[in-house]
Image (cartoon, grey):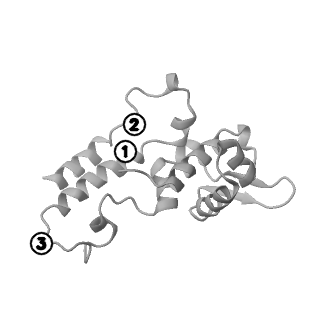
Amino acid sequence: MRLSSLADYAVLMMRTAATHCGGARANAASLGAEAGIPVPTAQKLASLLGRAGLIKATRGSGGGIKLARPAAAITLADIIEAVDGPIALTGCLDHDGADCCALERPCEIRPHWIGVNAMVRGTLAQVTLAHLIATPAALPAGLPVPPAPAARARAMEMLS
């Protein structure tokens, strides 16, 4: 499993935007340059992240890009889904399960993938931009943190 390059760049660009002190604005080109992302890619990401409500862009003098909400309220899952769409480990999780593969129905594995996918997404949803800008010594032990007990119990029920 691997994130798309665009999702990887989006996480990097969002982290860069989050490190700008006091909510200072920067344009997509300067954020891209600071993060080492090509300008056309940074501009595309700014558009996708803006549509997802993760950043706000203001035009004109004093304008630029800033986070739409605090870094602690933006998760890796938010960023990845803004760029790649819903997190789905297999094709049958990307749809309602219909016509996702050539295997005969009923699929005995799909219910298990649903639980695994929920655990992966739950973990990504617990890692915030605030975690990504913190110094490693300031991070909670064992990050990424496992899903909350209730979420984990639901996911485990789906697996059984």
Report helix, strand or loop for mark 3: loop
* Gap in angstroms between the C-alphas marked 2 and 3: 34 Å
Amino acid bearing label 1: Thr
- Residue at 70%, 40% in the rendered image: 20
Residue 106's tag is 3
- Give the residue type that dot 3 points to: Pro
Query: Of all residues shown, which one is farthest toward the bottom?
Result: 99
Disc 2 marks which residue?
144
The percent coordinates of residue 112 (x first, y second) are 18, 56
User: First in sequence: mark 2 or mark 1?
Assistant: 1
Name the residue beneath numbered marker 1: 123
Image point 56% across, 52% down: which residue?
Answer: 10
Q: Crowdedness of circle 2 by 10 Å Cα count: few (<14), some, many (20+)? A: some
User: If you read the primary sequence from the N terminus, does the residue marked by circle 3 or circle 1 appear first?
Assistant: 3
Q: Within 10 Å of the Cα at label 1, are there few (<14), some (14-19), or many (20+) other Cα atoms? A: many
Q: CA distance from mark 2 to mark 1?
A: 7 Å
Q: Amino acid at mark 2?
A: Pro
Q: Nearer the viewer, residue 1 or 85?
A: 1
**Labels 2 & 3 near each other (Cβ < 8 A):** no
The number of numbered discs placed on residues in the rendered structure image is: 3
- Pointers 2 and 1 in contact (C-beta within 8 Å): yes
**Residue 92 place in picture, x, y as percent:** 27, 68
Q: Residue at x 33, y 43 (%)?
A: 147
Q: Nearer the viewer, residue 51 or 90?
A: 90
